Amino acid sequence: MARIGTRGRGGVRTDRNDLDDASFRHSGDEGGARVTSSDVPDYIAKNWAAWERWAPGFVAQGRKDWNERDLRWGVWGTAESELGLLETIKPAADVVELGSGTAAISAWLARHGAQPVAVDFSRRQLDTAYRLQLEIGPSFPLIYTNAEQISYDVESFDLAISEYGTSLWSDPRRWLPEARRLLRPNGRLIFVTNSAFLMACTPVEGGPATERLVRDSFGSMRVEFPADDTVEFHLTHGRWLKVLRAHGFELEDLIEIRPPEKATPRFEFASLEWARRWPSEEIWVARRT
Ligand SMILES: C[S@@+](CC[C@H](N)C(=O)[O-])C[C@H]1O[C@@H](n2cnc3c(N)ncnc32)[C@H](O)[C@@H]1O
């Protein structure tokens, strides 16, 4: 995902900070400590800075996503009506979105009767979410904090979702325990990330996946992208299972997305041809044990 910054559409750089604190007060900034770079792991500080740089490049996509009737998941925009991931959530379910970005998933959930809370450490991403709340609606709390440490009580939520949020940008040994703490017994966790296969075929300098295994899958789960000064976390399936179990989750489903023949990716992590042959995107569904 860090290749956003080095691939075609991303890499927006700006030093201007035009955010208005008032927007966050209005939109429910009651929970969560502010992120400061001195008291967080190095990867949080790096990724945080990167997302503040990139956020302006996500406004248009955010607006498009907020205007969609059907919820679209992931890079291939797979429709919720096809996946049915949220079919069984109870009315008025409490949902936390970890690394919500422009919070289109939370918006869709709010429209369908759930009570979402969108958490992100990029003020600029949350500012876009806030503007879209005013422009399109509905409103729900936007929490500006590192999603590895959220000031909500234990067992506050029925469902935790992360779509290329903490699921990719944070250490699972830190964000999974926090997700577990926040979930009620039997609560569900749904997260979307790049497949282990895609990462093994992604060039070290970034760019779309090749047809060669160019990266090690064993070794550190921490994957650095020096060109963007960002850090991601990628695990093999076996390692995901272990870490999920170790932090009190039981796997319910693992969906490997195969895009349809004419799909267009939102980001060029892999060509359509590649993603029709190998899994590029995974959706993990787990339950708090
Ligand atoms: C790819 S975007 C998420 C996309 C999102 N599903 C959407 O529709 O906009 C990743 C987001 O995760 C946020 N993020 C990454 N790590 C985070 C962390 N530890 N705490 C809070 N937000 C985080 C980034 O600021 C960014 O907005």
Image (spheres, grey):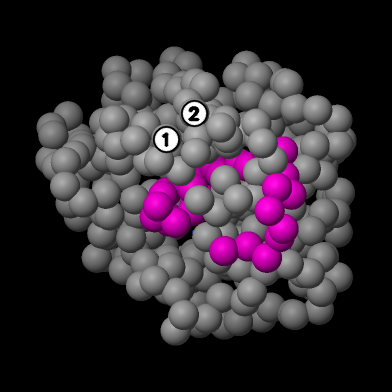
Q: Is residue 74 above or below residue 224?
A: above
The stretch of residues the image draws in magenta is 149-176
Please tell me whether mark 2 sits on a helix, a strand or a loop: strand
Residue 153 in view of the camera:
yes
Q: Residue at x 68, y 53 (%)?
A: 154
**In terms of secondary structure, where does tag 1 sit?**
helix
How far, Cα to Cα, is label 2 from label 1? 6 Å
| Residues under numbered marks 2 and 1 in contact, where contact means CB atoms less than 8 Å apart | yes
Viewer can see residue 46: no
Q: Position of residue 113 (x, y in %)?
A: 87, 35
> Image check: 246 left or right of 89?
left
Vertical arrangement, residue 87 with respect to residue 132, above or below: above
Q: Residue at x 77, y 43 (%)?
A: 94
Asked whether, in this view, residue 268 is left or right of residue 212, the answer is: right
- The front one of 264 and 248 is 248
Q: Is residue 15 magenta?
A: no
Q: Which residue is mark 1?
A: 245
Q: Earlier in the sequence, mark 2 or mark 1?
A: 1
- Left or right position of 40 against 89: left
Compare residues 122 and 18 and report the one nearer the observer: 122
CA neighbours of label 1 inside 10 A, class few (<14), some (14 to 19), many (20+)? some
Residue 80 sits in quarter = top right
Q: Which residue is mark 2?
A: 250
